[in-house]
Amino acid sequence: MAERRFTIADVARRAGVSKGAVSFALNGRPGVSDETRARILAAAAELGWVPNRQARALSTARASALGLVLARAPELLGADPFFPAFIAGVEKVLAARDQALVLQVVTTPEAEREGYRRLARDRRVDGVFVVDLRRDDERIALLEEIGLPAVTLNRPDVPSPFPAVVLDDRPGIAAAVRHLVDQGHTKIAHVAGPEPYLHAAARRQAFTDAMGEAGLDGRVVDGDFTAAGGRDATRRLLTGPDRPTAIVFANDVMALSAIAVAAELGLRIPDDVSITGFDDTDLAGYVHPALTTVRADAGGWGEVAARTLLALIDGPEDADVTDTALPPAELVLRNSTAPTPPTPQETQ
Amino acid sequence: MAERRFTIADVARRAGVSKGAVSFALNGRPGVSDETRARILAAAAELGWVPNRQARALSTARASALGLVLARAPELLGADPFFPAFIAGVEKVLAARDQALVLQVVTTPEAEREGYRRLARDRRVDGVFVVDLRRDDERIALLEEIGLPAVTLNRPDVPSPFPAVVLDDRPGIAAAVRHLVDQGHTKIAHVAGPEPYLHAAARRQAFTDAMGEAGLDGRVVDGDFTAAGGRDATRRLLTGPDRPTAIVFANDVMALSAIAVAAELGLRIPDDVSITGFDDTDLAGYVHPALTTVRADAGGWGEVAARTLLALIDGPEDADVTDTALPPAELVLRNSTAPTPPTPQETQ
């Protein structure tokens, strides 16, 4: 299925000349007879081959497209409300600037590396968005190596020459913990996102730090951002020993699934258990009880990331496109949190 | 922001020759001196201009990319679980075939038309997916006119030369109605999707037809596929006169928001009101009560649509790529439906 591209050697062979003669003819240098030049140009045209310099200039100056390579199982992508909102934000800017978005979804690290390499090699995009940063993210070095301009969502934990558009999740999680502590909760648990992601790690760390500041120990259990994972983690917490009276979830989907778990166990939210989410998805305000959550503006993040990447691409080569800090994630108070019950262990 | 492309006239001007001389030189025909030819080639290289034939062959045989133009407000796109799942399905096929997906989100009919024209003109894609078919959809004629291969999701209501990948929503809705009628419901309402969409119209018609077959009159109220729209429509139905005992929603998001409305009104689902959704989103099985809904395999639809479009593009020009029918949407029974209460008007 891969594209077949002809090389200068193919043109030389077809025209019956040396590679040097092809180069001379196509670069308009003397020393090649009219007849030979004609034969070479005809061979190049027949094969659809043009020399790199022309090809590069043609593809022109610009691909007028930006790339997004998502390394997620398609199933997980379909369940995550972040990406449609982020992409919608990116597209708001691109539509106004006559740019397109090239999207690749890959499922293995090899396919991810090859995805970026291919985008660069085929000059399909002028730059890429780097999302879902991971610990020791090898994409930064790869993009430097292949010379593809990039913008990262948040700062990587490795040295990076690329501008970052920063939206700090942590103040939102810290505010959720403080809110619960203010309501009298001391047994507060966190259902975290998948380990390798820096955003999941940042939320987990923000939870632990805020609990520490309140003089409390926070319990953390692993989640995977899916509804099924949220249900399982919530069941473990609510049926195990020393049940928490409040749970801070790393995303809304897991928190929304917790509403059902509580109902099945005969526990009332928020009277018996308080919960908070993260994302402020479309549905969060329309469930019962309406979900207290943390809002990070994914659409706005997409807009600023797109503008930053276009500035990087359009600017002079040594232009200094710096990091941008967006307003941090913030707590949205609704009805899924309440003061702690007097003796939570006995309410069941 | 638009790309600046040079023409043959620019090259001629720069080299100080006629346009005919440029053409002769670049097509390798005799009658141009070596020196002139060299000047012309240098001018062309400096401007990054290559003649169309070469440009077309270069961009090569293939863009190795498929296009998706979405005419939806970015906000609505972010709230719809169909597209991530559909795109994930498309990408499954594209990743294995070394193809990319070019995504454009547009908000006006003009921008939509221009989006398709630009994809074709810049040879950015080899073909496009046509989703969200509307009544008298003008995109079919446009794509024919600009010669861009396409696959439609379902059959348009206008003549179309393009293969359709058909997934019939109607049997799922009809099954939902029959299930409710079997449970003794006679007052059944439908919260529909936005009017211009053929899929929303098909679901609405399937509801009305199935009610008619059961000898019942179905009430239809307009929704817009959002959680807020679902809440408003549900409130109207449940607080108005002659309250229905069952509601068939045109999508899950609206149905999920109805769970909260019922709870706020002191009505139990399914004891007082039965509800069904459409989509089988990630969350549908993890709410309380778990949502009875209709499943249409958006991911599988994406996969088959991608394979169909690639077959159309890869095949000989007169190859007959025919319509494909996928398994129709089907009812997924969970816990949000129950037999009708004896005297529903009095339970409130």
Image (spheres, coloured by chain):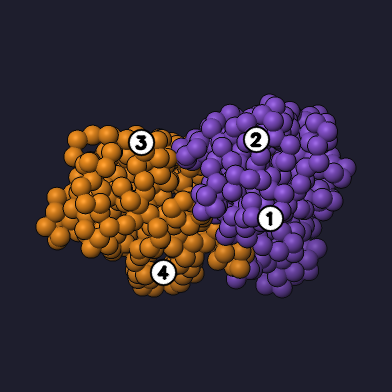
Chain colours: A purple, B orange
Q: Who is closer to the viewer here, A281 or A285? A: A285
Q: Chain letter for mark 1, please.
A: A
Asked whether the viewer can see residue B113, the reply is no
Distance CA(mark 2)–CA(mark 3):
29 Å
Position of residue B209 in the picture relative to residue B36 (left or right):
left
As helix, strand or loop, the secondary structure at mark 2 comes to loop
Q: Who is closer to the viewer here, B148 or B43? A: B148
Q: Quadrant of residue A14?
A: bottom right
Amino acid type of disc 2? Pro
Q: Chain letter for mark 2, please.
A: A
Q: Mark 3 points at which residue?
A: B265
Amino acid type of disc 3? Leu
User: Where does the image place residue A78, in percent across and percent down from the top left?
Assistant: 55, 54
Q: Do the residues labelled 3 and 4 touch (CB within 8 Å)?
A: no
Amino acid type of disc 4? Glu
Q: Which numbered disc, 4 or 1, marks the residue closer to the eye?
A: 1
Q: Do labels 1 and 2 share a chain?
A: yes
On residue A342, the disc is: 2
Amino acid type of disc 1? Gly
Q: Are marks 3 and 4 on the same chain?
A: yes
Distance CA(mark 1)–CA(mark 3):
33 Å
Q: Mark 4 points at which residue?
A: B317
Q: Who is closer to the viewer here, A125 or B296? A: B296
On residue A215, the disc is: none
